[in-house]
Amino acid sequence: MPANTGKKPVAKKATASKKGVKKPVFKAANATKKNSATAVAKKKKLPYEIWGNKIFRLKVTLGGTRENVWREILVPARFTLGNLHYILQTTFGWLDCHLNYFASATDRYTADGSTELFPEDKDQSVKLYAVLQKVKDRLLYEYDFGDSWEHYIELTEVLPRRPKGIQLPLCVDGKHRGPPEDCGSYEGFTRFLKVMRTPSHKEHKGMKEWYTGRYGLDSYDPVFNKDEVNQALASLDLPIKWERYIAHCPWLAKHSQAK
């Protein structure tokens, strides 16, 4: 037994915690990871949220011609390739009589209803922002597999939103009227221009009658008419049906009546 010293044992005082000082709370490691993953998921936006309001400025050049035929257009990034097809048909003055496709570096996108003929191709319901995402990205648009009109599309600018006071799609610039439909590709277009510019040419009368019968115009004016194109674009209601499309394009309406 311990020796009795005669002194009473002294109890140690409990140390009181200071008021207002919070004790640290330790969370389980798995709970922390879960919260972090939730935070990341909330920050991640869907493609439409990122691109929905953005506008693409596209430079479209018709390849193979000496006349340097091109258009510069503004289109919503959320439009589909199918929508862009109608816009290009309108801005270049085509009659939408033939098949077409778009091609990126990795895929080819065939016109709606043509995927059975080209089973390896994708359809044109893909959004523009899925194939064009940064400046200088490019696409190829080929129209009429017989004449093989190749249009080279380049993304030149990405606008954060639609500029005030304008309606989209919009053609902002361009050069030279497009070739007439079925004129015989690039060589045929060059020959067409030569004959139409030379009234004394032995084929001038027949060529003029052919052009007038197809487009309802007395002569071929090579000057690009931006107002005419934008008037037709303003009438487009995309996605659009063929019947409504020809009703708002004067050159198409004349062609439809001649069929």
Image (cartoon, helix red, strand yellow):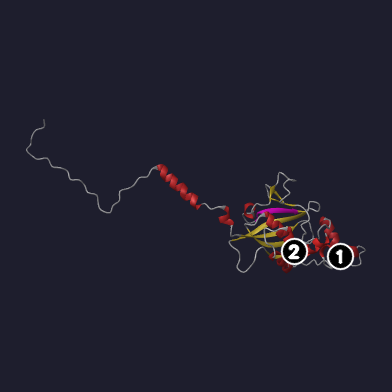
What residue range appears in magenta? 136-142
Query: Was residue 242 drawn as part of the magenta stretch in this picture?
Result: no
Residue closest to the eye, 152 or 259: 259
> Can you tell which of label 2 and label 1 is closer to the viewer?
2
Residue 164 x %, y %? 60, 68
| Residue designated by label 2 | 247
Q: Secondary structure at mark 1?
A: helix
Q: Secondary structure at mark 2?
A: helix
Q: Residue 86 is drawn in which quadrant?
A: bottom right
The secondary structure that dominates the magenta segment is: strand
The extreme right residue here reads: 202
- The image quadrant where one finds the C terminus is bottom right
Tags 2 and 1 touching, CB below 8 Å: no
Q: Amino acid at mark 1?
A: Met
| Residue designated by label 1 | 196
Residue found 70% across the figure and 64% down from its top = 233
Query: Was residue 141 drawn as part of the magenta stretch in this picture?
Result: yes
Label 2 packing within 10 angstroms: few (<14), some (14-19), many (20+): some
Q: Measure the C-alpha gap from mark 2 to mark 1.
A: 28 Å
Left or right for 21, reference 175 = left
The extreme left residue here reads: 6
Left or right for 167, reference 36 = right
Q: Amino acid at mark 2?
A: Ala
Residue found 49% across the figure and 49% down from its top = 41
Residue 150's place in the image compared with 12, above or below, is below
Residue 205's place in the image compared with 81, above or below, is below
Residue found 71% across the figure and 53% down from its top = 140
The extreme top residue here reads: 1
Residue 159 x %, y %? 60, 61
